[in-house]
Image: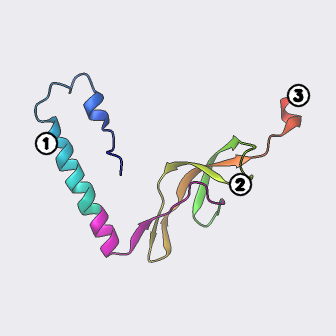
Amino acid sequence: MKEPQHHLKNDEKLKNNKDLEKIIEGIEVVKKDLISIFKKNGIEVIECVNKKFDPNFHQAMLEVVDSSKEPGTVVQEIQKGYLMKNRLLRPSLVGVTKKNDKKSEK
């Protein structure tokens, strides 16, 4: 698994902060604990990228013209969605493909 890039490390004001690594480690520990609590309570992330758009689990925020994929395919996740014991907690906010409408180009 690839190490996630932290935007804090790229911030010029924080680059010389000696405590930055400790802060990032603390955030990672909280993240792991939160994921563990989610799993224990049956909360899971909705996997949506490259899946067919489903209004029961996804909320379309934008349309993307992409002729390489079937219209109605989720190609971008703007905000993660969650299920709790297979019931929707929050829909995924997504970008969905659409056909190239040649009439709108004229």
Does the magenta segment cover residue 44? Answer: yes
Measured as percent of width and height from the top left, residue 65 is found at 72, 40
Element type at mark 2: loop
Element type at mark 1: helix
Is residue 39 rendered to the left or right of residue 74? left
What crowding class fits label 2: few (fewer than 14 Cα within 10 Å), some (14-19), or many (20 or more)? some
Mark 1 or mark 2, earlier in chain: 1
Q: CA distance from mark 3 to mark 1?
A: 56 Å
Q: Residue furthest bottom?
A: 85
Magenta-drawn segment: 35-52
Which is in the foreground here, disc 3 or disc 2? 2
- The answer to whether mark 1 and mark 2 are in CB contact below 8 A is no
Q: Residue at x 88, y 28 (%)?
A: 106
Element type at mark 3: loop
Image disc number at residue 72: 2
Mark 3 or mark 2, earlier in chain: 2
Q: Amino acid at mark 2?
A: Gly
Label 1: which residue?
A: 22
